[in-house]
Amino acid sequence: MEVRVRLFANFRELGRLKGGGQGSVVIPDGANVERLLVELGLPPDAPKVVLVNGRNAPLTLVLNDGDDVAIFPPVEGG
Amino acid sequence: MKGWHGRILRVDLDSGRTWEETLDAKTAKEFIGGRGFGIRYLLKEADPKGDPFCGKNPLIMMAGPLTGTGAPTGARYMVTTLSPLTGAITCSNSGGMFPAELRKAGWDGIIFQGKASSPVYLWVDGNKVELRDATAIWGKTTNETDDLLRAETHPQARVCCIGPAGERLVRFAAIMNDKHRAAGRSGVGAVMGSKNLKAIVVRGTGKVPLHDPKAFKEINAKLMRKFKDTYKDSPPPLRVHGTAVTVMATQNYGVFPTRNFQSGSFEGWEAIHGETLTRTFLVGHRACFACPISCGRVTRVEEPPFEGEGEGPEYETIYALGSDCGIDNLAAITKANYICNELGLDTISMGSTIACAMELSERGYLPEKDVGRKLRFGDAQALVELTRMTGYREGFGDVLAEGSLRMATNYGHPELAMVAKGQDFAGYEPRGEQGMGLAYATSPIGASHMRGDPAYFELLGVPCNVDPLTWKDKPPVVAKWQDLFCIIDSAGLCVFYSVRNLIKPELMAPPVGIMELLNAATGAHYTLQELEKAGERIFNAERLFLVRAGFSRKDDTLPPRMLKEPLPEGPGKGMVCHLEEMLEDYYKVRGWDQDGIPTREKLEELGLLELDPSGPREK
């Protein structure tokens, strides 16, 4: 299946994703968020927020074909 | 005393007299410093129903016991007074270098009372204190004032001052320090202007005395090692992109306020995002005193007609002057930010008030002749011009200077002002972030993201993820984080560092790291329970002041748009803010009655009865 991934800030460079950190990624059916992170080559212990279709997603969440995944590092808005 | 100097500088602007007041150790421990000291003095000395612009309203500036000590981000001070925007208490916080300088000069804080008969500034050179004539600098911008006063006193002195907006009593005028840092919210600059006080200039060459310097140094070293380790792969995103990087987070959650909170998704977000700022106008980054993060944006715009240089914009500024006004022109937003800094205006209320005027105009409630132009969302030129006009109260700027609620009320539509207790929302949409709705409604100073910022656990995964769209689980967490922010703001620390590094990573956020630092600095031997109780005491003391000013449950509310109109798009599509359900539980958690009044038992438990000798209060 294929999911749409958007990486932000330093994850754009850290992640294995061409096209400025945005694009489609093919992963096996039944793969979860953790599997996708491995696929993307993101440091597993780096603090991050993962949104799937605009909702907070745990590492164990099983992804579906066509999901929109946004991943960003710690930020704050003062 | 250690950590605290135990010295407060008192200034009577009526008589020109200045004197030193000592602070006792018990009060210091119970109220910590900064924000806690502010409310403690306000409760004792201000008339809760008084006129913010009368001489009796004290202007209280307090640093914390960690300010200027070298503790990471120990750089901050709090300005507490009656707000001309909300009619009740305000406290507004700032960092930079000025607060640490005040502490190095040997003072924990300054309290101004009265009104000078002509413009003055206060020159604090260590123990030497002098009120000086400021007639020649009245009318100058904050940048000019900073340069002129350092030339007149000492080149390494630190300046906090007001600009033309504070002089003209714009109800959301800021107090600027070190040129680009702002105690921005609720009109503290207007109170300073009403006192004919243009600036405070401080030079300090001493050190803050510490209880256990060796232990303090070890804790600092440990914290610095941890910080470096966290960012070993790449520097902190806040240093690289500033707070502006948060645009992508709120946009993805659908809580990026757009067109006066008509939506939480802005189609032009990428043009005004932090990563775009980094690519376009960023020149460098700047840190406050003892800060390892360095999130300040030094920027320059060369695009006509918005040329300029200075610092900013922050995330909140980008929301207020950008998406909330339907503007995707980053040059114009940055230019309006520079104008706000130079004239001394709160960027949040400035943008939110213009956004409100844009909606009033588009709906036909605000006549074109009043504004002098056809006002529509997305008009970048209007944004920049109206910002300048507000600072000088020129033309329609005089109407904007009264703030969104007064303006919208005058045009017959108060419901279009996106405010709580008269103060404009920060950059988070409460329908898509339920805990933020509760925090806006119950913040003592009116809407603010900096009174317990639920964005941390609702959007940013700190210390863990809590779904932003649920509401039943929010009251105890919001209350706890409100108390936590009282502790951070009172200690003199920055929220950005503290919540990620000085609390135990649990949802109820035990402030163990702050306790360690405070104990090494002060020797006050806080237990965790005592420190958390102090946070709760400060929050309740602020509530007590509000209650005495006539506030109650009826004021803990949000505009009807948040409570009745479903969010039109994004992940929170169809949601309203479930405030009433949350309030019921929130009051129970707080130990307040059904009307939001702290019970006698709660006040007694917190040791606040003695500060409330008035007995039964009006409702």
Image: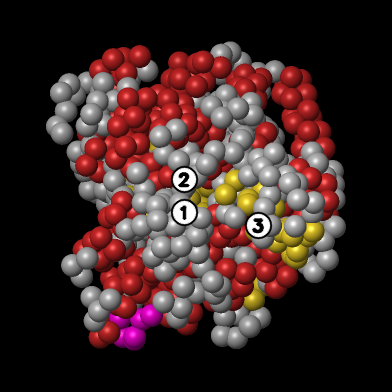
User: The residue under label 1 is which amino acid type?
Assistant: Gly
Q: What element carries label 3?
A: loop
CB contact under 8 Å: marks 2 and 1: yes
Farthest-out residue, front: A29
Residue at x 54% of width, y 71% of height: B267
Residue at x 22% of width, y 48% of height: B51
Type of colouring? secondary structure
Report whether residue B218 is seen: yes
Cα separation, mark 1 vs mark 3, equals 17 Å
Of the numbered discs 2 and 1, the one sitting upstream in the chain is: 2
Q: Give the range drawn in magenta.
A: B371-376
Q: Are marks 1 and 3 on the same chain?
A: no
User: The residue under label 3 is which amino acid type?
Assistant: Asp
Q: Do labels 3 and 2 share a chain?
A: no
Q: What element carries label 1?
A: loop
The residue singled out by tag 2 in the image is B469
Cα separation, mark 3 vs mark 2, equals 20 Å
Q: Is mark 2 on a helix, strand or loop?
A: loop
Q: Position of residue B347 (x, y in %)?
A: 47, 62
User: The residue under label 2 is which amino acid type?
Assistant: Leu
Q: Is residue B252 toward the left or the right of residue A72 in the image?
A: left
The residue singled out by tag 1 in the image is B572
The residue singled out by tag 3 in the image is A67
Q: Which chain is home to disc 3?
A: A
* In this view, B189 is above or below B280: above
